[in-house]
Image (cartoon, rainbow, N blue to C red):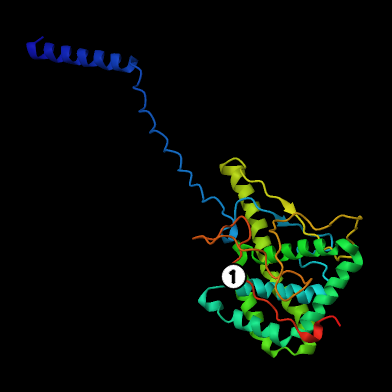
């Protein structure tokens, strides 16, 4: 056998051996899978905030079984309705000081002058209602209730909407005849009251939204009080001797209004002026707008 043939045989044998060895070697493992993508970033929505810049915990009047929220304007007598409208406009005249609300003050003053006799008669009727129900202590009950009325209308988170509604009412006053003031009050006061109902509903929705947010993103941090006002002239309000049924909503001490002997107060004393309005309670501006005493209304 020639040398070339021998080398060919050797190469063939070597190749065959390598092939046999390769056949016995296990295959290489597959490459590892790529790492999983990072989890998506959790985007936490902003925490719900109270409407109107209100505090995170405040008293909200409850809804009665009759579907009417138990505020100072619930279950009123006709005299209360007219007088509470007067009180609302008084608060508006003293607190709605932005230029767009400038028409409230002159309209309110005109209202006092034009309807002086009717308002004096309403005042006397209101006193009679309290006196008949509460006897010698009626004045304390009436003053406490009227203080709550003024505090209610001066609720800072609802102030802008209250001023807008009061301006709309004030611009209609000159068109209201003396004979129709009670009828007008029965429709105008609910319009102003609607401002506060809207705020209370917005606040209740805020509580719902906050509860859902806390359940997913954080622990509960807010406690909200639900409470109702008490109208002392409501026929369903029980009266115990020597007691006052007026609730314990935030209030300040009443003041006596000059020229109105034994009349409901016009406005509680003003707090010291500050750079920003508080949101945890009412605020009042200094000064009073007093209804002139009508000679015809004086006791004879």
Residue 284, how many percent across, how many down?
A: 61, 65
Q: Residues within 10 Å of mark 1 (few under 14, many from 20)?
A: many
In the depicted view, which residue is nearer to us: 88 or 190? 88
| 236 displayed left or right of 276 | right
- Position of the N terminus by quadrant: top left
> In this rendering, does residue 269 appear at all?
yes
Where residue 201 appears, x then y in whole percent?
A: 68, 61
Q: In the image, is residue 119 above or below residue 245? A: below
Residue at image position (33%, 16%) is 25
x and y percent of residue 103 in the render? 58, 82
Residue closest to the far front: 300
Residue 183 seen from this side: no
Image coordinates of residue 70 in percent, x first then y, are 78, 61
In the rendered image, which quarter is residue 175 located in?
bottom right
User: Which residue does the image show at 57% across and 53% down from the upper left?
Assistant: 48
Under circle 1, the secondary element is helix
Return the residue at label 1: 95
């Amino acid at each position: 056998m020639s040398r070339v043939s021998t080398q060919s045989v050797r190469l063939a044998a070597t190749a065959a051996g390598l092939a046999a060895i390769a056949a016995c070697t296990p295959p290489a493992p597959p490459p590892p899978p790529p790492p999983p993508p990072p989890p998506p970033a959790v985007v936490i929505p902003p925490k719900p905030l109270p409407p109107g810049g209100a505090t995170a915990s405040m008293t909200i009047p409850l809804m009665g079984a009759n579907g009417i929220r138990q505020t100072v304007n619930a279950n009123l007598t006709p005299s209360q309705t007219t007088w509470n409208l007067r009180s609302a406009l008084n608060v508006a005249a003293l607190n709605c000081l932005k230029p767009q609300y400038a028409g409230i003050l002159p309209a309110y003053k005109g209202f006092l002058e034009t309807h002086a006799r009717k308002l004096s008669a309403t005042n006397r009727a209101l006193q009679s209602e309290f006196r008949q129900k509460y006897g010698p202590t009626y004045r304390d009950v009436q003053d406490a209730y009227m203080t709550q009325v003024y505090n209610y209308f001066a609720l800072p988170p609802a102030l802008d909407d209250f001023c807008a509604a009061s301006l709309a009412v004030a611009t209609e006053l000159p068109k209201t005849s003396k004979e129709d003031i009670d009828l007008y009050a029965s429709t105008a006061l609910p319009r102003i009251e609607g401002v506060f109902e809207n705020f209370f509903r917005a606040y209740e929705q805020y509580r719902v939204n906050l509860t859902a947010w806390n359940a997913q993103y954080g622990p509960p941090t807010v406690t909200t009080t639900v409470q109702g006002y008490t109208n002392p002239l409501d026929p369903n309000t029980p009266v115990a001797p020597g007691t006052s049924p007026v609730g314990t909503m935030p209030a300040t001490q009443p003041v006596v209004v000059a020229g109105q002997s034994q009349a409901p107060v016009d406005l509680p004393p003003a707090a010291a002026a500050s750079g920003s309005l508080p949101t945890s309670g009412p605020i009042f501006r200094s000064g009073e707008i007093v209804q002139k005493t009508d000679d015809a209304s004086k006791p004879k």
